[in-house]
Amino acid sequence: MLFLTCMQLGLLTLPFGLLLFTMKGVAPPGIAMNDVFRAALPYVWFDLLVLAVVFIFPPFATWLPSLLGG
């Protein structure tokens, strides 16, 4: 879970930010790259929060799947 969250953060932040370039590619022509960066910031902060919670409380990573699996 930690690895996947870190990978998602890497794809959503600079210097690589492949997801940001994908979002810019499907955005209307009037949208600047700076707008895409600012729109992605809440998701970056939320991902950092999830990363911290799962790091501090590892059972949260398996809580929901255990409910669905029976």
Image (cartoon, grey):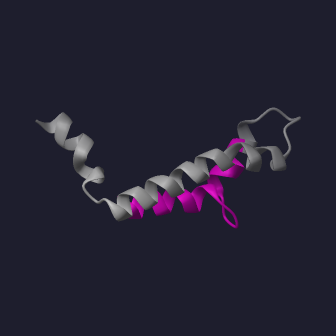
**Whole-percent x and y of residue 35?**
81, 44
Which segment did they paint magenta?
Answer: 1-23
Residue found at x 66% / y 64%: 16
Which quadrant is home to the C terminus?
top left
Q: Residue furthest top?
A: 28
Residue closest to the far left: 70
Q: Magenta segment: does it hold 18?
A: yes
Q: How many marks?
A: 0
The image shows residue 29 at horizontal and vertical percentages of: 86, 35
- Residue at horizontal 28 percent and vertical 60 percent from the top: 58
Q: Does 8 sit above or below residue 40?
A: below
Can you say whether 31 is above or below 3 in the image? above
In this rendering, would 17 be left or right of 37? left
* Location of the N terminus (image quadrant): bottom left
| Residue 31 forms part of the magenta stretch | no
Q: Position of residue 31 (x, y in %)?
A: 84, 38
Image quadrant assignment for residue 54:
bottom left
Viewer-side residue, 28 vs 41: 41
Residue furthest bottom in the image: 15
Q: Main secondary structure of the magenta part?
A: helix
Position of 2 compared to 19: left or right?
Answer: left
- The residue drawn where x is 53% and y is 57% is 48
Q: Residue furthest right?
A: 30
